[in-house]
Amino acid sequence: MLSAKQTVHFKQVLVTRIAEQESILATAQRETRVAVARYADPADQAAAEYEKQSLVHKAAAARQTVKTLKQALERLRQGSFGECAECGGDIELKRLEAIPWARYCVRCQEAREQG
């Protein structure tokens, strides 16, 4: 169970990371619209298409990260943040510091990755 101070700390960490990811998402979406320009040279077209696909991938990754972070923030509000979704035990504070959106304790996460 987290203390009030730890809860405030993790809420701030999650809110900050959400803001960072939303900024990355907005930038990627803006750059994607700019990258739509047409080029006469086939090499320029290929480079522009590669850049566009890279930006689309970056935006999708940021969108997924925002979703994951918001889910962690919701768990914090509900009082289940830091509780393993698999075994119900506590997720280690060191793990939460490294990966504040973690849903599983180290043991359960390793079991999920192996199985």
Image: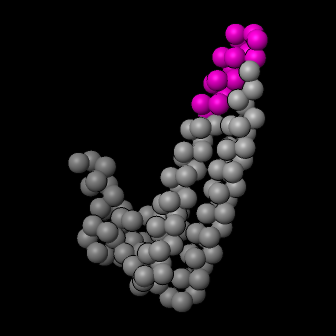
Q: How is the image coloured?
A: one colour
**Residue situated furthest left in the rendering:** 115
**Residue situated furthest bottom in the rendering:** 4
Q: Where is residue 97 shown, x and y percent of the image?
A: 54, 68
Left or right: 24 in relation to 92? right
16 inside magenta stretch: no
Q: Where is residue 9 shown, x and y percent of the image?
A: 60, 79
Left or right: 12 in relation to 85? right
- Classify residue 103 by image quadrant: bottom left
Left or right: 18 in relation to 96? right
Left or right: 17 in relation to 110? right
| Residue drawn 34% across the image and 70% down it | 84
Residue 25 in the image: above or below residue 96: above
Which residue is nearer to you in this view: 46 or 73? 46
Q: Which residues are magenta?
A: 39-54
Q: Where is residue 44 shown, x and y percent of the image?
A: 74, 16
Which residue is nearer to you in this view: 113 or 29? 29
53 inside magenta stretch: yes
| Residue drawn 50% across the image and 59% down it | 67
Q: Is residue 68 visible?
A: yes
Residue 81 in the image: above or below residue 55: below
- Classify residue 90 by image quadrant: bottom left
Residue 115 in the image: above or below residue 7: above
How many callouts does the rendering have?
Answer: 0
Instruction: Considering the whole magenta stretch, tell me its main secondary structure.
Output: helix
| Residue drawn 69% across the image and 51% down it | 26
Q: Where is residue 1 shown, x and y percent of the image?
A: 41, 85
Q: Is residue 94 visible?
A: no
- Classify residue 13 by image quadrant: bottom right
| Residue drawn 68% across the image and 43% down it | 28
